[in-house]
Each structure stands twice: as structure tokens, then as C-alpha cells.
């Protein structure tokens, strides 16, 4: 059995993963609405979701760096950067 600090760090990683899953589910709602015209009600505007994804990504990067090599992280950052750019384009279309 690990120390309290080890268990606390593990719980923070679980929490980070749960936040990521929640954000991906929110992203799915936006995609269903915008790309497929489904009658769903996203929990966030695309702009708000992009910001939440970026904050989550910062936390994820910090966690990643404690146990993994930085060289593999760029792909994940690039993917989320592209997703956030698309979300902001969705939001811009609403205001034009």
C-alpha cells in the first residue's frame, strides 16, 4: 500500500481523466448539433468549450510531464489545438 501522497497523486490523475471524458462528451454534443444537425442541447457554447479544453490540456500536460517524455506530448497538444480552432470557428459563425 502506497503512502498518502502516492494515493493523492493517483486520485488527481483519475480526476483529470474524468474531466477529460466529460469534456469529450460535451464535444460530442457540439459535433452532433453542428455537423449532423441533431436536436441536442450542448452544455457549453463552442467558445466556452474551447477554453475549458485548453485549461484541461494545461493540467494534462503538467501531469504528463511527471511520468512521460515531452517528445510525445506535441501530438496531443496539436490535436486539441485543432479542435479548439474548429470550435471557435463555429462560434464565430453564430456571431456573423
Image (cartoon, rainbow, N blue to C red):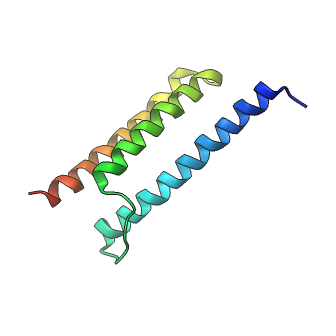
The outermost residue toward the front is 4
At 60% from the left and 49% from the top, the residue drawn is 18
Of the 4 image quadrants, the one containing the N terminus is top right
Of the 4 image quadrants, the one containing the C terminus is bottom left
Write down the quadrant of residue 62 in the picture. top right
Write down the quadrant of residue 95 in the picture. bottom left
On the rendered structure, is 9 left or right of 31?
right
Q: How many marks?
A: 0
Q: Position of residue 87 (x, y in %)?
A: 29, 51
Q: Position of residue 93 (x, y in %)?
A: 15, 58
Q: Is residue 21 above or below residue 62?
A: below
At 65% from the left and 36% from the top, the residue drawn is 12
Q: Position of residue 69 (x, y in %)?
A: 58, 21
Q: Position of residue 31 (x, y in %)?
A: 36, 63
Q: Is residue 20 above or below residue 73?
A: below
On the rendered structure, is 44 left or right of 19?
left
On the rendered structure, is 32 left or right of 21?
left
Amino acid at each position: 500500500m502506497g503512502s498518502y501522497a502516492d494515493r493523492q497523486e493517483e486520485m488527481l490523475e483519475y480526476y483529470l481523466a474524468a474531466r477529460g471524458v466529460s469534456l469529450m462528451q460535451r464535444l460530442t454534443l457540439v459535433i452532433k448539433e453542428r455537423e449532423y444537425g441533431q436536436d441536442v442541447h450542448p452544455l457549453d457554447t463552442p467558445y466556452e468549450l474551447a477554453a475549458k479544453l485548453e485549461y484541461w490540456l494545461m493540467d494534462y500536460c503538467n501531469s504528463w510531464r511527471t511520468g512521460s517524455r515531452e517528445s510525445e506530448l506535441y501530438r496531443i497538444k496539436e490535436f486539441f489545438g485543432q479542435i479548439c480552432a474548429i470550435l471557435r470557428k463555429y462560434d464565430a459563425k453564430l456571431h456573423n
